[in-house]
Amino acid sequence: MKKPVSFILAIMIIAAMLTGCGSKPASDSGAASPAPSAAQTVEGGNEAAYVTADGKCGCGCGLDVSGYSAHIQELICNAHVNNETLNVYGSCDESYVNAVAYHFQELFNIPSTSIRYATGEMFSRTEEEKANPQADVWFGGSTDYYIKASEAGLLSPYDPENAKNLVSDQFIDPNHEWFGIYAGVLGLMVNVEQVEDLGLTVPTSWAELTDAHWAGEIAIANPQTSATATNFLATMHYVYGYPDNFDESGYNAFMEAFDKNVTQYTKSGSGPSKMVGPGEITVGVAFLHDGVAQIANGYDNIQLIVPSEGSGFEIGACGIVKNEANPNASKLFVEYCLTGECVNLGKNNASYQILCISKDTGAEQPEELVQWGIDDLSKVNLVDYDVEDVAPQLSDWTEQWLSIIAADDRLKTE
């Protein structure tokens, strides 16, 4: 379904660009009312100009904005008057990223495009484009990389009024450069049919994955491109006593033995989950909501495991890229992300994460998570993952990992 969505999105963008905001609502006299000038609709301008008496956008496009706050009406109007567009870099499942961009365009009549990257790749690409930014916003992907992006000067601060919709302050960056929208738990996806055929038992710990009988049966993402994989590196640091009693030799021995059993390091964090059900591998290491998506897709041969030593977790976020081209559309997108209307698109587009948005907004936690006890982080055996401490070390930990493993064509970057 991805190609049709992308095709429809492209048609909508072209149509929006052709029509723009040129249509004007009729006044009581039947004559077209004049659109306010750009000078009236910039920040700090005449508030009354942002919306007409009958609740339509003040730019004259006819869009009904009566259901939005004055601040959001202002953002919509300014985006229209300035002919702003939006380019989304996303790190959720591609269908989710596309659906969010499409729905944003549909709601606000702002031409929007989207492209999906693995989280590490999204960071690298944005860093490479720093002098000439191509993205306006990020959607999804772990806060580890949002923190790295903030330190690299890639993100812009914004104080959204919809931050009130978040269920906890832990999902708000102190510098207001990112905002959590979902959470996920790292773990194992196991093909129980394959386990039986191999005459083995379902692994319940990280340590078991180093046994030679799993040789060629495991897949995990590549830490060079995926935040899921760097989350795994950080998780194993904690399992081996980081930060106070880190057993470096034990960690290195684990990674070396584990590497011998890995058949592929995928580019994307969700890649292993898609290999488990069809039997390409027996064990996939990834965020468990990706496994839930595969089970929902009909692969009832998958069992989900949170390893007994404890596991890591992620907070998936959204934020504004430092790019002056489309400031109003970018702020409006963050406001949109922090609503139930946005995050509810996830479960219909292969994304079953734990939502960080209050149910008072209409946000509905995916029922599929309840079965596995991963609908709330407080229910799960987690390591003491400190994302603020981890984020600055991810590059070094990835380099150290590369020095331990057998770097070969199993490492996928394309």
Image (cartoon, grey):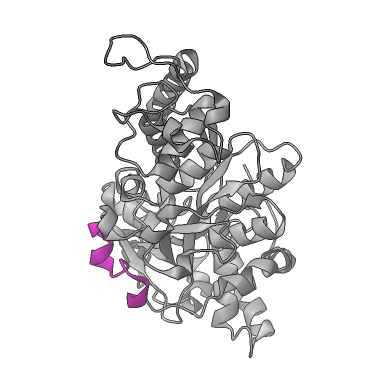
Q: Is residue 235 left or right of residue 304?
A: right
Image height check: is 151 above or below 52? below
Identity of the residue drawn at 38% across and 31% down: 51
Nearest the viewer among 196 and 294 is 294
Please identify the residue farthest to the bottom as the structure is shown.
Answer: 245
Question: Residue 386 placed where, x, y %?
Answer: 56, 75
Question: Is 182 included in the stretch rendered in magenta?
Answer: no
Question: Residue 315 placed where, x, y %?
Answer: 47, 63
Nearest the viewer among 236 and 192 is 236
Q: Quadrant of the N terminus?
A: top left
Nearest the viewer among 22 and 18 is 22
Question: Residue 214 placed where, x, y %?
Answer: 48, 67
Identity of the residue drawn at 41% across and 36% down: 104
Identity of the residue drawn at 42% across and 62% down: 183
Q: How would you classify the magenta stretch by its main secondary structure? A: helix
Figure disc tally: 0
Q: Is residue 108 visible?
A: yes
Nearest the viewer among 187 and 315 is 315
Image height check: is 32 above or below 293? above
Q: Is residue 412 visible?
A: no
Specify start and end residues of the magenta stretch as a single range: 365-379
Residue 289, quarter of the rendered image:
bottom left
